Amino acid sequence: MIDAVTKPKTKVKPGTERPRLHKVILVNDDFTPREFVVTVLKAEFRMTEDQAHKVMITAHRRGVCVVAVFTKDVAETKATRATDAGRAKGYPLLFTTEPEE
Ligand code: TYC
């Protein structure tokens, strides 16, 4: 006998899924001037002087600091632009990205 009833092959996931966000991380180094780090944070991440100073000093003391979270594309573009701003001045300033848990 032919069983005409077939199970659907794909499962529908319940709920609404948002794309994973990615962190932009500021990495400390011994050469980039503090004020330049603050300038880049203000320009690329639209931070106030106060916010930028807090992020810079956290990276300076702890080695790294999460700057902000964005979609993957935006996080990577901003990290690259901010890193390039340092490189243009001859500084080893580094911003990296990683997916949020
Ligand atoms: N450590 C640098 C200095 O003392 C300042 C600095 C802070 C550099 C944070 C990078 O991500 C950084 N001039």
Image (cartoon, helix red, strand yellow):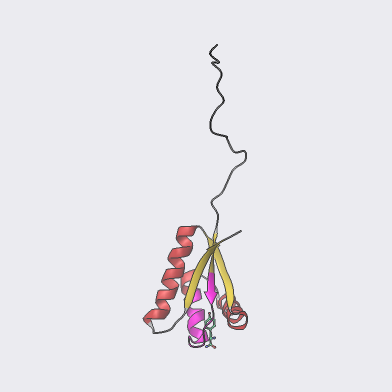
**Quadrant location of the C terminus in the rendered image:** bottom right
Q: Residue at x 62, y 41 (%)?
A: 15
Q: Residue furthest top?
A: 1
Q: Which residues are magenta?
A: 25-42
Q: Position of residue 24 (x, y in %)?
A: 52, 67
Q: Position of residue 63 (x, y in %)?
A: 59, 79
Q: Nearer the viewer, residue 12 or 45?
A: 12
17 sits to left or right of 82: right
69 sits to left or right of 76: right
Say if the magenta span includes residue 83.
Answer: no
Q: Nearer the viewer, residue 84 or 9?
A: 9
Compared to residue 15, the image places residue 93 above or below, namely below
Give the quarter of the image for residue 80.
Answer: bottom left
Give the quarter of the image for residue 57.
Answer: bottom right
Q: Residue at x 37, y 80 (%)?
A: 88
2 sits to left or right of 15: left
Compared to residue 67, the image places residue 100 above or below, namely above
Say if the magenta span includes residue 26.
Answer: yes
Q: Position of residue 49 (x, y in %)?
A: 55, 78
Q: Residue at x 53, y 31 (%)?
A: 9
Q: Residue furthest front?
A: 1
